[in-house]
Amino acid sequence: MIRLLWAASAEVRYFLRRYMPSNILLDLIRTRKGLKWGVPAMLLAGPYLAVASWCTTLIESGGPGWLHLAVLVCIWNALKMVIIGPVSVALLVKARIRERQVEHDTRAEAPLPEFARNGQ
């Protein structure tokens, strides 16, 4: 039974990582070229919270109960978008430090020009 639940949770996770738009966006942001888009992605939290608010209003006016799930998903996605901003900035700083270190190391290992070796 536990193996079945484990396999099912793995399949659900795979489906969500592969096909849900917010997860696709987060995967793209986590790449080296996408790190610069982390802070602007934080702005997507606004529409997610607006949809959650709208769904809450519909629920209070007698809407279907499954909208509670939509509210939960929207709030969860809004939190993910808010968190990716500072995380991407930290990852970008880390990547730039690493790139500068590699650049510095390659410059230090570069051979000296001919005139510098002869002492001229």
Image (tube, grey):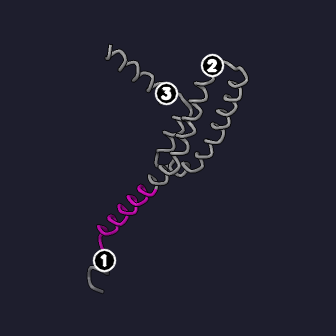
Above or below 104: residue 57: above
- Residue visible at 30% across and 86% down in the picture: 120
Give SS at disc 1: helix
Mark sitting on residue 114: 1
Query: Quick one: 30 or 74, which is closer to the camera?
Result: 74
The quadrant in which residue 110 appears is bottom left
Name the residue type under label 3: Leu
Judge left or right: residue 97 versus residue 56.
Answer: left
Camera-near label (1 vs 3) is 3
Image quarter hosting the N terminus: top left
The quadrant in which residue 60 appears is top right
Question: What's the CA distance linking mark 1 and mark 3?
Answer: 59 Å
Question: Which residue was labeled with disc 2?
Answer: 65
Asked whether the residues under the numbered discs 3 and 2 touch, taking CB atoms below 8 Å apart as contact, a structural biologist would say no
Q: What stretch is highlighted in magenta?
A: 93-113
Q: Where is residue 80 in the image (x, y as percent from the top left)?
A: 52, 40
**Residue at far bottom of view:** 120
**Residue at far left of view:** 118
Q: Residues within 10 Å of mark 1 (few under 14, many from 20)?
A: few
Upstream in the sequence, badge 3 or badge 2? 3
